[in-house]
Amino acid sequence: MNYITSLISRAAVAVLLLLASPALAQPRQEFLLTSNWKFAKGEQSAAQQPSFKDTKWQTVSVPHDWAIYGPFDGNNDLQKVQIVQNNEKEASLKAGRTGGLPFTGTGWYRRPLTELKLAPGQRAVLLFDGAMSNAQVFVNGKQVGTWPYGYNSFSFDITDFVRADGPNLLAVRLENLPEASRWYPGAGLYRNVHLIVTDDVHIPVWGSYLTTPQITAGFAKVKLLTKVASAGSLPPNLRLQTEIRDASRRVITTLNTPLAATDGHEFEQNLVVPSPQLWSPETPTLYTAVSKLYAGEVLKDEYTTRFGVRSFTFEQNKGFSLNGQTRKFKGVCNHHDLGPLGAAVNTAALRRQLTLLKEIGCDAIRTTHNMPAPELVQLCDEMGFMLMVEPFDEWKTPKVKNGYSRLFDQWAEKDIVNMVQHYRNNPSVIMWSIGNEVPDQWAPGGSKIAKRLQDIVHREDPTRPVTAGMDQFDAAVNNGFAALLDIPGFNYKPHRYPEAYNKLPQGLLLGTETASTVSSRGVYKFPVERAKDKRYPDNQSSSYDLEASNWSQTPDEEFAAQDDLPYTLGEFVWTGFDYLGEPWPYEGYWPSHSSYFGIFDLAGLPKDRYYLYRARWNPTQPTLHLLPHWTWPGREGQTTPVFCYTNYPSAELFVNGQSQGRHTKGPSDQPQTRYRLMWNDVKYAPGTLKVVAYDAQGKAVAEETVRTAGAPHHIRLVADHSTLTADGQDLAYITARVEDAQGNLCPDATHQLQFKVKGAGRFRAVGNGDATSLEVFHQPKMHTFHGQLVAIVQATDKAGEIQVEAKGTGLAGTTLRLQAARSQP
Ligand code: GAL
């Protein structure tokens, strides 16, 4: 439901209730502050003052990423560093390390709080889901608070700073330092800002904590702790009435609890859900606890806690079980940027990422290496993904000059507390990480820091285990660091899992970060060979999926360790999606400025690895995929290996009808031949490449054909969905393909395509997944990369038809029609 509509309809209900009973005034109002913001880049003197004239500033809507509009430039945040953890021997200039975008420096945002009217005895709170970074928040010219870490959520009570009848002016100063990150952080108010108005007696931000201490087939016990706050002393006769509703909003139980003198400022309620529907990635059933806070008969506040009922255990030698079923994490690590949209959060963009991850059978995400947007966590609850939520990439010892180490002593506990309190009711969150590859693994006192941080997490949430991503195997295993974690997590160490298992007390271990295989969609290099840190003159990596970093592996090496060692808990692949920044192995090789690690490219198009993981992780869908493409003018007669990613056990390959032999996957010393079918000696001849797959009984059950493409002929547009919600936010992702007259993808086409969007939508951004492309994302034109790109179209708030027109020189253009419809109330 549209937020504003929901507010209006709630207000309408409140008015009706008010007529019926004066005790039931609308207790809580929440406003999403999206429109009406003014923004200026650069330092501005006295911009926090209400009298400051911002008429010349840009009008923007929030979430907003000021840097994603570019232009790209290798001098943006140019870093001269030696990355010890990448085994570099000396410092070198790293252009593009943080994306080559202009995110450093100061930016200001201003907005009148026109919706704010405080009745006597009401309070106002500003809640930021994240602000990048070093936020200073001012109301009516006075500073109400600061929060330096750009990824965390934080709130300030602004009651004492506002005029009850207005006008009230909110101003936010943000500043991003250079050399503060190893990837693109984004810039500005890139997550949502909320204004919350409550009675003086209210439930504070993240004021509830819900656990399910006992779950059987017959019932789930629900324990709900709810805080109550007031500027003064609490009134007498406070009571909390909580009803639990099931997924269809049916009330299944209600409890009324008075606040006893001995309860302090917290209600404890114990409720029962009969015959609970369990939450899992496959069945993401959600319940809600709706709590009404009364003083006598006066409704003071209403607060909703959404939750799921699920149990899990991590047990020595048994591993991880969810609801009694043993399983291994089929996870990916993701950074927070949304490719062409930058860091500005958008629910539809996140939903599309999760939809794509579901297709490959992925069931878990590690939010590397920072707190996620709340929209992601909510979607993971709804769509069924298990989350490892991670706050930090460094503690006291720096990785980058101006990174979190500057804040660690003063802020680490506050940052962890906010993170855990924010997300501890979300069923998708299964474990916390306290950090990634922190250099404190081997620094004196590092274990003591780890213990302290783990203790803070346990104090805030005793129901979930703590892990950390460790890369310094010898130091961490020998100095006690690895032994003290609830779950030892290793980055890129499949070959050392047995040693870790033998030396550590936990009896299990997790692949917190795995593979870091690099590839560029549509790019195949010859000869085909396994290589580390392989660089080519065109700054691309081969999609035969045999190239990795010097510290990492091909996917198959991790698969073998996970399959052979029962105490492994699964893996989190680096990464699900390509991201802005960290263009290894081309860090410092401008114009590379986005990563090559993704299973999906920066535009969200699948690389070949999509099929390798899908074949392994998604047993319910047949996967049969051939690579490379079969359009190689000039390679006639040359050796052109063909790989097949499939979950069928064996297959036979044909080139123009000529059998190349039948291969079967199976145990082998070579992890590749165990998980892929490979024909290494195929000689290229234009025509058709066909694979016939056989099931375990030897029956031919499926086939796949790739044809040599002819000349580029037309553009084809394919939308990920054709009906959008007319809410001004929803997005359609439209893949544009350059095809020959027969509809084959022209795999080397580099045409520039132009877009026009008319009707009830607007052009939002475009991306082609090329890590070297310096074309900006927000102009409605871009060159295809290996025949494809993705245009992103956004719904307006009007229902109606959207026409997306695509043109390109020498190609037949096309128009795609989508619908924007009002959402169902
Ligand atoms: C890891 C690190 C990640 C990323 C990755 C690339 O060591 O934890 O953040 O840098 O390497 O392979």
Image (spheres, rainbow, N blue to C red):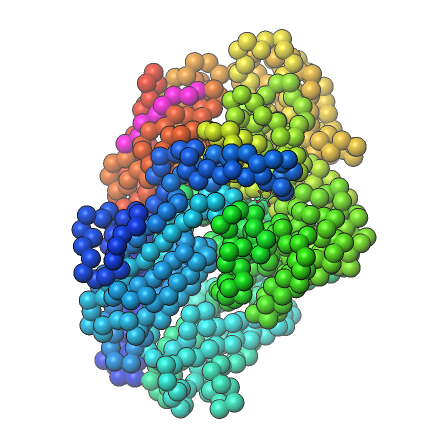
Q: Main secondary structure of the magenta part?
A: strand
752 in magenta: yes
Instruction: Classify the position of the N terminus by image quarter.
Output: bottom left
* Residue 490 shows in the view: yes
**Where is residue 104 drawn, in percent x and y?**
39, 45
Identified at 73% across, 40% down, the residue is 560
Identified at 22% across, 72% down, the residue is 163
How many numbered dots are placed on residues in this image?
Answer: 0
221 in magenta: no
Ligand 1 sits in which quadrant?
top right
**Where is residue 657 drawn, in percent x and y?**
63, 14
Instruction: Classify the position of the C terminus by image quarter.
Output: bottom left
Q: Nearer the viewer, residue 745 or 558?
A: 558
Residue 811: quarter of image: top left
Image vertical order of residue 664 relative to residue 235, above or below:
above
**Where is residue 814 drawn, in percent x and y?**
32, 26
Image vertical order of residue 12 relative to residue 588, above or below:
below
Q: Nearer the viewer, residue 698 or 295?
A: 295
Q: Nearer the viewer, residue 560 or 588?
A: 588
- On screen, residue 53 versus residue 643, left or right, reads left
Identified at 40% across, 66% down, the residue is 155
Identified at 41% across, 79% down, the residue is 229
* Residue 61 shows in the view: no
- On screen, residue 408 versus residue 683, left or right, reads left
**Where is residue 25 drawn, in percent x and y?**
28, 78
Look at the image and give the residue range highlighted in magenta: 749-756
- Considering every residue shown, the one lying at the far right of the view is 502
